[in-house]
Image (tube, rainbow, N blue to C red):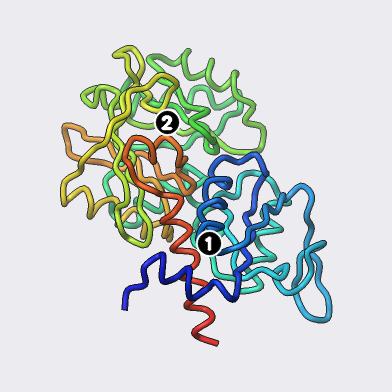
């Protein structure tokens, strides 16, 4: 039997589920999801990884200072892992306590590593740009140039790890690649990704938000300028979009390929067909909700509460 959000709120009301939202208090998506959870009868606590620690005692894994197994929470939500080791450690504490959540840390870590994402999509046999991973040390300049020439200029450059649309550029020559490498402090945190560029797309793509295999929202994006190939830039043109049944199959398979239950899949239409260009395990909600008229935060809240209800029914 399907449970509506209203019925779910009523069934959980007397138990007042407590949910930990892992991330900095200023995170906009956490605030939106937290508000949606509280409207549905839950209580939420933003657990900042920089101020909260894990502990192991006689009763098993706990979090301090909240106390209790899994910090006394009924579920947790960690939209992204990021580079913070303390965040990873805190998420590990919650996962080890077997608390309900949406995406696992393992799936999030794959999605946040652009090369790991490329490999996962390749294993699933899904269409994506031709991509090469090359080290960022000075001595590999020739290797980077050879990689770009094998794909064919212009090429898209990306840092292996990047958040919020950072670390992406278009290279038209070898010198562009070296300027990009110099401008980004790669260090030991990753390598350079060189990918095929599709001029025919005209800087346009789609952000498709999925949850539990259901397409919730489709956002069509354009940079707003023919001189800018990136669609997700300030001042871009964003409208409600539509995708074909075949594209729906593609984005669902992409989520499954990474083990994600909640994600934003970026889809591009090329001369060779539709391809997946990126997967975001923590798709920004505010703009998509406004453009598509969909309560994404509410959908995330209802899905998490549904997992709590299922866990309680199983005990």
Among the two numbered marks 1 and 2 on one chain, the one whose residue lies closer to the N terminus: 1
The residue to which callout 2 is attached is 194
Measuring from the top left, give residue 190's x and y in whole percent. 58, 38
Q: Relative to residue 244, is residue 214 depicted above or below?
A: below
Number of numbered labels in the structure image: 2
Find residue 266 and report its image quarter. top left
> In the picture provided, is 79 more to the left or to the right than 200?
right
Measuring from the top left, give residue 205's x and y in whole percent. 29, 32
Assign the C terminus to one quadrant of the image. Answer: bottom right
For the point 49% across and 59% down, the residue is 103
Q: Residues within 10 Å of mark 1 (few under 14, many from 20)?
A: many
Numbered disc 1: secondary structure = loop
Assign the N terminus to one quadrant of the image. Answer: bottom left
For the point 55% across and 27% down, the residue is 140
Numbered disc 2: secondary structure = strand
The residue to which callout 1 is attached is 104
The residue nearer to you, when weighing 56 against 126, is: 56
Real-space CA distance between mark 1 and mark 2, rounded to the nearest whole angstrom: 28 Å
In the rendering, which numbered label is found on residue 282? none
Q: Relative to residue 166, is residue 262 depicted above or below?
A: below
The residue nearer to you, when weighing 187 against 73, is: 73
> In the picture provided, is 223 more to the left or to the right than 53?
left
The residue nearer to you, when weighing 139 against 251, is: 251
Q: Relative to residue 172, is residue 300 depicted above or below?
A: below
For the point 41% across and 65% down, the residue is 5
Discs 1, 2 touching: Cβ within 8 Å:
no
Front tag of 1 and 2: 1
């Amino acid at each position: 039997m399907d449970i509506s959000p209203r019925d779910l709120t009523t069934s959980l009301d007397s138990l007042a589920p407590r949910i930990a939202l892992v991330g900095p208090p200023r995170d906009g998506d956490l605030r939106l999801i937290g508000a949606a959870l509280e409207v549905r009868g839950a209580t939420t606590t933003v657990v900042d990884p920089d101020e909260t620690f894990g502990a192991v005692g006689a009763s098993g894994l706990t979090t301090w200072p909240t106390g209790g197994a899994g910090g006394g929470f009924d579920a947790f939500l960690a939209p992204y892992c990021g580079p913070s080791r303390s965040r990873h450690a805190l998420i590990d504490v919650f996962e080890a306590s077997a608390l309900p959540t949406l995406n696992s840390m393992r799936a999030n870590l794959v999605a946040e590593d652009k090369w790991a994402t490329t490999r996962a999509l390749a294993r699933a046999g899904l269409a994506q740009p031709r991509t090469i991973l090359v080290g960022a040390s000075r001595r590999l300049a020739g290797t980077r140039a050879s990689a770009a020439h094998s794909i064919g200029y212009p090429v898209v450059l990306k840092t292996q790890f990047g958040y919020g649309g950072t670390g992406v550029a278009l290279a038209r020559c070898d010198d562009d690649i070296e300027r990009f490498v110099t401008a980004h402090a790669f260090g030991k945190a990753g390598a350079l990704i060189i990918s095929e560029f599709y001029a025919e797309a005209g800087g346009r793509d789609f952000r498709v938000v999925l949850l539990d295999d259901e397409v919730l929202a489709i956002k069509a994006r354009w940079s707003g300028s023919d001189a800018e190939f990136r669609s997700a830039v300030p001042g871009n043109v964003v409208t409600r979009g539509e995708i074909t049944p075949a594209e729906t199959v593609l984005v669902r398979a992409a989520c499954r390929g990474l083990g994600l239950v909640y994600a934003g899949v970026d889809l591009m239409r090329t001369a060779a067909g539709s391809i997946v260009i990126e997967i975001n395990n923590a798709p920004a909600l505010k703009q998509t909700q406004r453009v598509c008229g969909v309560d994404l935060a509410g959908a995330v809240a209802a899905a998490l509460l549904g997992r709590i209800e299922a866990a309680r029914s199983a005990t």
